[in-house]
Image (spheres, rainbow, N blue to C red):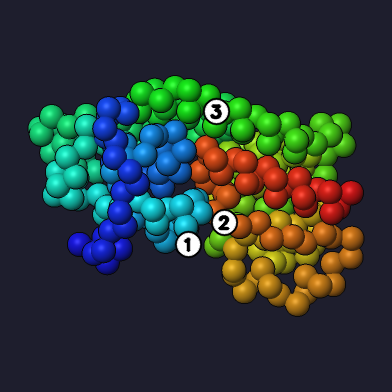
Amino acid sequence: MLAACAQPAPVIGDAGNAGPTIVSLNPCTDAILAEVTEPGQLLAISHYSHDPAASSMDMKRARQFAVTGGTVEEIIALQPDIVVAGSFLALSTRTALDDLGIRVETFGMAADVEQSVGQIRSLAGIAGQAARGDQLVARIEAALADAQGDADGQIPAVLWQPSGIVPGEGTLIADLMRRAGFSSHSQALGMGQADYLSLEQLLVSPPRVLLIAGQERSQAHPALDRLSGVHRASLDASMLYCGGPTIIAASRRLKAIRDEVS
């Protein structure tokens, strides 16, 4: 048993007749379900969401929910109507849950805003809370509209992620950067998804904006201080991978950075 599961936090409220009870095994679905379910419906979230280094949720909010390491034994003990998991759910776990007659729904990583909105509506539908899903989508659309950048005057930017890699096309964060008025400088250099960006490459061909979302030695190298005309800003790694409510926080942060540059 994972240490994070040793003393689970209390589940909020009592589901009563609000809808089916759910256990979430994925940090991205955790964050969405926490927004679209009624109190008591979400019996547990993944242990990742109690880890500040892995969660896309606010820690205070996340710790209002019990956590699970995703073992079949833990899930059975919670007696959920539905288990929501990532697309890489272990086959043995899926088979065991199927054999027990527990409904399983799986979701992959959203590649853009439209896919994330689709996932929100699907998860809200699974929870029997379509109106709550609509409310979350409306908040996301408002944040995107507020952060909308100039499509004809985009600012060349590099997002330097943990492990020194960059995002490529077909990723949610790349879509959010484009919407906020940034063009991909790494793509212009011929780099794709998860390619490693060395300090040397960056110094030879610096962008207008350098967004740092990692803690590699190279990302804090003194040589970066000598890059003239480059605006450096931090971007929390929790904003990189999940959609749903994370889109709101990421859009606001990207807008703030763009406003600093402008």
Q: Is residue 166 above or below residue 52?
A: above
Is residue 109 something that shows in the picture? no
Q: Residue at x 61, y 33 (%)?
A: 140
**Residue under pointer 1:** 53
Separation of residues labelled 1 and 2 (CA atoms): 8 Å
**Residue under pointer 3:** 135
Name the element at disc 1. loop
- Left-right relation of 123 to 75: right
Separation of residues labelled 3 and 2 (CA atoms): 26 Å
Closer to the camera, 33 or 18?
Answer: 18
| Mark positioned earlier in the residue sequence (3 or 2) | 3
Give the mark toward the camera: 3 or 1.
3
> How many tags in the picture?
3
Are discs 3 and 2 less than 8 Å apart at CB? no
Residue 237, disc: 2
Amino acid type at image mark 2? Ala
Q: Residue at x 57, y 56 (%)?
A: 237
Q: Is residue 67 above or below residue 101?
A: below
Give the mark toward the camera: 3 or 2.
3
**Horizontal and vertical percent for residue 213?**
62, 59
| Mark positioned earlier in the residue sequence (3 or 1) | 1
Q: Residue at x 41, y 47 (%)?
A: 27
Q: Residue at x 59, y 68 (%)?
A: 215
Closer to the camera, 247 or 87?
Answer: 247
Amino acid type at image mark 3? Gln
Is residue 151 something that shows in the picture? yes
Are discs 1 and 2 less than 8 Å apart at CB? yes
Categorize mark 2 by other alpha carbons within 10 Å: few (<14), some (14-19), many (20+): some
